[in-house]
Amino acid sequence: MVFQLLWGGNVLKSFDTDTVFDVNAIVSHVLFTVLFDEVRYVHTIAELQSVERAAKGKADIVLGHVQVLGLPEHRALMETAFVYGVKYQFVLTTGGPVLTNMGVEDISSLTAGLWFLHCKGASQSQHSDPCPHTALRRALTTLHIYTFLQLMEAPLVVRSQSEASVEPSEVNMVHSHLQVPLLFLFSQPHTVALDRVTAQTLAWRLRGQVGLVLIHRESPDVKIPLEYNAAYRLPGEGSEVKYLILNNLEEVIDLFRDESTPEEEEDDDNWATLDVLDDEVAESVYRDRGQSLDMDAVTELTADIFHSAVAESDYTVVLFYVKWDAVSMAFMQSYIEVSESLEDADVSDVELAVLDCGEWTDVCSAQKISFFPTVRLYRPQEPSQPYQGMLGTESLNRFIMLSRLVSPVLLSSPDEVTSFLKGDLYQRHAAIAPVTVLGLFSSTADAGVSVFKEAAKALRGETMVGLFADRQAEIWAVEYSVTLPAILVSRGPTGQTEAHSLNLSMPDQLVTHIQRALLDTFPELTVENLPLYLELKKQLLVLFVGEEERGRKENRVLEDMRSLLNTGLINPYLPCWIHLGRTPAGKAVLEAYLGFLPLLPALVVSQLATGGEVFHYPTGRPLMVQPILQWLQRVEDGEEPPTGVIVDEKWMPSMPFYDFLSVMDQEVPGYASQRSAKTKTSRIERAEGEKSSSGERQARAGAHNPQGSPTTKPPQTPHHHSEL
Amino acid sequence: MDSPILLLLALLIALIQCFPDDYHSHNSTRHHDYCVLGAGPAGLQMGHFLSKSQRDYIILERNSGPGSFFNIYPRHRKLISINKIYTGRRNREFNLRHDWNSLLSDRPDLLLQRVSRELYPDADSFPRYLSMYVKELGLKVQYGVDIGKIRASESESPRGRGYILTDQRGLDYTCRVLLVSTGLWDPQKVQFEGSDLVEGYESIPVDPEEYKDQAVLILGKGNSAFETAQSILGRASRIHLYSPSPVRLAWQTHYVGDLRAVNNELLDTYQLKSLDGLVEGGLEDIAIVRNGEDEKKRSGRKKKCRSSGKEKRGKLFLTLSELLDSSDGRNSSKVTATNLPVYHNDNFSLRQPYDRVIRCLGFRFNFSIFDGSARPPSSEGARGRLPGVTAWYEGRGTPDLFVLGTAAHSRDYRSSAGGFIHGFRYTVRAVHRVLELRYHSNSWPAIKLSISQLQSWLLRRVNEASGPYQMFGVLGDIILLRGSHCEYLEEFPLQALPQFSSLSGHQLSKHGLLVLVLQYGLNRTDSLGPGRAESEWTRAWRSNFLHPVLYYYDKLPTERDMRHRPVGWPLPRPKAVHHMIEDFLTEWDGPISHSQPLRRFLEHCLHTDLRAFYAESCFRFSLTNQKPPLFCRQGYLRKHGVVRNSQLWQHAHDAGLMPGGQDSASPDTDPSFPDYLTRAGTSVSSAINLDF
């Protein structure tokens, strides 16, 4: 079983039942997803209708209206959406025709409202009919909404038929817990059918306010005075059952209309204090707040020791951070791990240090830190080197290990070159960075050598770079049929080695050139390397490979793809693959592309950079060169229907902001308004604290009155003038 | 004799105009780009900035050392500016929030605490500190130059007019820009009948013994009045403070120029009815009379017993000028009973005679040295005691003449700290930035930031910046929004916002701007009463204490907008405003109360999602959206994504999928689902209502 959250037809998130086995898990997952895009905003009746159509037979809709965003009602609504987003379709409107549609007469007076649209039970065939709805008739608070939604879930009419011995005073159902009044109707055996209809009608009218129970009189244990046909019980411990004679429906409805309005207003706020972080990084760091970081593993620098510390070690890596930056604090954990792992690996020439820019602000200003977190490598007598890789343990570790190697490594003999390319020369490094680059020059006198050295310096920490400048370099030039100068890119002992002629220009151009050469022609896309390949701005021809596919089958499929590559006919594409086991995020991508999880392996064209359409290679068709090429041709010719689109939506704020201005305008009218030209002068004077007018001064002059209070003195005393 | 000098001058000016960058060679002829008048704290502060930017400047000082005001004042030798040397923090910028005496410099140890460790240092330590400041920064100060006359140079030129300063020896100094930091030296006096019988704060004896058993009337209710009262509290028999307005307490008004608690012991003795008191009344229509003959019968004998040398002095009475009979009324010999208020009003508060009447009414700017052509007008505020200046502290009607320091306080009189060292050290810096643009085309320093960094940067400023903290409501940081990046300018004078581009050299883009200001709140509640502090962030706009406020404008406010700004606001009504809830510890770094509401506000202004995402999420967004969220674009897609903790990742893999409930201690357990939220519905996380 799979839970899916749908939005605009796209699967945003799906999770297996075994990951949502308990309420906490469901709530935690849903809450976040909901914040993304689960709440829909509608402005017109047509928009609402389309939401209704989509929901019919599937889910009920909770329609909320708040006139002003940011008020407690809005918050209560959003909080409910966090909790119930998966169960109901939440729709928000800010007024207008939609409200009229819900039967609101005076739109402007309604500041907030909530309706439950019973779409789940509605038939899909009745396309245009609106779903029946129930309005929440109380203030929008989390508690009220919660109660209301519970009531919506409760059966419309509870029948006590089966439970023989039921007295109204003993009836105990969800409504009692929810502090909702109960209405009992007593049915006669011969009027059962009719009573049911009455009960139904009444229940619809009172839905959300009152629980309705149909009790059968025939049961011998039920001792209800015969003259009554109805009874009700108000919420609260030990409240009595009141019997009455029901003549018409309106009577009953009026009864509850009066009873249900004046209720607990004082405990509104207890529920409305939920401030949920909707930033996954901030939230995860916040949740970790109980855990104190083991800062012993790193050196905490101060302004006093910064310069001496970075001069002391051969390599000092410094993490510049501020405590209030969640990304810094999330990365701090990985950083400490790297430090520990370096210690375990007995790497003694590298010092990992941190510097709190919130405290040592001078150092950070002097170091021109304008990005948090920033990681830099300091070496004595060298300019510091920024770390520009992923903020994760593996990347950083690789950077540090590679940085300890001189770049370029100067190779002196053909044997060394061979062992360098095989990765034997620096085995420990080759293990973490199998791809190496070797520059081949015919002589050290070559002008390009210095450019290459510059480029190699810039690549330090990123890739292992070797340099062989000797006449014997010709051996490889011949072997790979390139002309010198050239670079060889070796992809480790099992991988291939490719050769590229060098077009030597400026060091930074050469750096880009080498970086491009390092890219795989048929890469496995991972979370870490995707940005490198997206830079190529090509359409992606992605093969999604399942997690259980290992070994031979996987290899065979990949081999087929490789041979496709060798045809040279798929240049506009970047052929690549994603292993859903190693890169679980790929699953969500695939679902977003197709709307479902297809059989694997699945081949997909993703026009990420162009047009934004997605095409799925038909399941079942063999993944072989010819059929694929034909299919690609059809895609290009526009003969294949796209199976999905890559949305091109602006990332608007996930939540509305708290509009202080409108709150001010509401609570203290005029406080936040520009003053008019007329009031200007007098107010400015007051604002600047001036005691200007002589009249005022004179009035005070006589008031030689230290007590200042007129009550302590006879009224005539303050003014001496009058007594003269 | 005169004409050759004039000729030379004219020639010089001509030369300067031709070779603008060449005239330091003419220093010997006393021409400078910048003349700073007065080597007090403001002058020296400006000196530092001019020296740092290697400008041709001279500081002219009439006395033989810097800060000579402090050789005399405060008379009772205790500075009331806070010198808090232990803050528990090592952040230099933050610590300046609690160091009100030091000047700004690049040297971390050039602070007053090197001279004094006292919270309220001895006044002598301040000139000593200034001398050290001059010496260590090598500032060019010329002592013993007493400028008696300042006039604008007649020759109009495209580069501005320039000023000519004449000293006591008749020597002229010419300068292109004149920076007046002369402070306030002239005691503020009020003329009334008998005002010659009044002693001034500037000359009263400071030995309390001189006041033994004397009744003293002090005119004024400011810090100098209370300082005087406090020093004689143990000796004087009765101290009355008299002035038009009631006492304003600095801790209530948040204005440090109002009565500081350091000096307010008299409030205690007043309220506990121990013979001292405060009285409100106008100053212009009172009169002080000495009773000549009457004195003998009432207190003459007593007086002769005294050891002090004032046996000749008669008692002084406070009366109203209208009670005196025409012109001869004030002659001491002619004072009659009907001339005194008590005759008409038997319980008149100030009916008892005084031994001394002391004027403690503060100081005023010395306008007299300015020739008409160079004289800034009197300020509209501050009872006209100060020169009127523009929002960028240029004299009104005196281009190229700027007023610095205490004399420039008319801009924020009784509202902020611009009249005090801890405030004007920042306005001086702002003025220097204006000068750098206007005369040297160096625009206001700005830091370029990625938009994804803006929130962190704002929090950084909010948590440490001393300029906006001290100059609340007056100086604010300006953030120019430019799409995916922004430019951050620090401490711009808010009232000059309509002239922003011409003063800063930065242009606005269509994305608009943010202004970060620190300000006190509505202040309508009892400062010590219940409900004085807010803790719920949604009520931040009702914060009473100093708290950060962000204003968002889509275009620059005009002068008209500025004039019509809401009452009590530093800025006009913006498109959107965000108040960050006041914080008891002034640490604005709470994820729920501070960061997230701020982020939502920024998101609103920037129309974009500013949340941070882990690399995994960015991976997904990058493949499923043509344009992933900003954070992913500025981080992940630049190969700088945030990878989640690998140990927890590994742990989760080993254990199979481990949703949050099982292992609540380490939320980051499940790799495929970042540990989002489990707090829904059940627990309540905020609203810890601390009482301050």
Image (cartoon, rainbow, N blue to C red):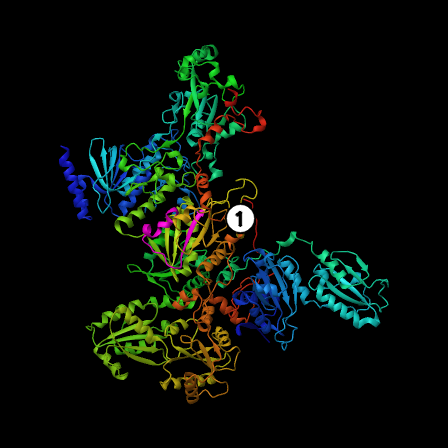
Disc 1 is placed on an element classified as loop
Q: Is residue B312 left or right of residue A44?
A: left
Answer above or below: position of B588 versus A395: above
Count of number-bearing discs: 1
**What chain does mark 1 sit on?**
A
Answer above or below: position of A453 versus B683: below
Q: Is residue A160 left or right of residue B471?
A: right
Q: Amino acid at mark 1?
A: Pro
Quadrant location of the N terminus of chain A? Answer: bottom right
Q: Position of residue B61 (x, y in %)?
A: 27, 35
Task: Tell me which corner region of the image, top left, top right, bottom left or bottom right, holds residue B212.
Answer: top left
Report which residue position mark 1 lands on.
A669
* Residue B507 shown in magenta: yes
Between residue B212 and residue A481, name the one nearer to us. B212
Q: Position of residue B186 (x, y in %)?
A: 34, 30
Q: Position of residue B619 (x, y in %)?
A: 45, 71
Residue at the far bottom in the pictured view:
A626
- Residue at horizontal 57 percent and vertical 71 percent from the top: A51
- The crowd level at tag 1 (other Cα within 10 Å; few <14, some 14-19, many 20+) is few
Between residue B46 and residue A562, name the one nearer to us. B46
Q: Is residue B186 left or right of residue B226?
A: left
Residue at the far front in the pictured view:
A678
Q: Position of residue B351 (x, y in %)?
A: 50, 19
* Residue B195 shown in magenta: no
Answer above or below: position of B647 versus A676: below
Q: Start and end of the magenta stretch?
A: B494-518
Task: Tell me which corner region of the image, top left, top right, bottom left or bottom right, holds residue A436.
Answer: bottom left
- Residue at horizontal 47 percent and vertical 57 percent from the top: B601
Can residue B223 be seen here? Answer: yes
Answer above or below: position of B142 versus B328: below
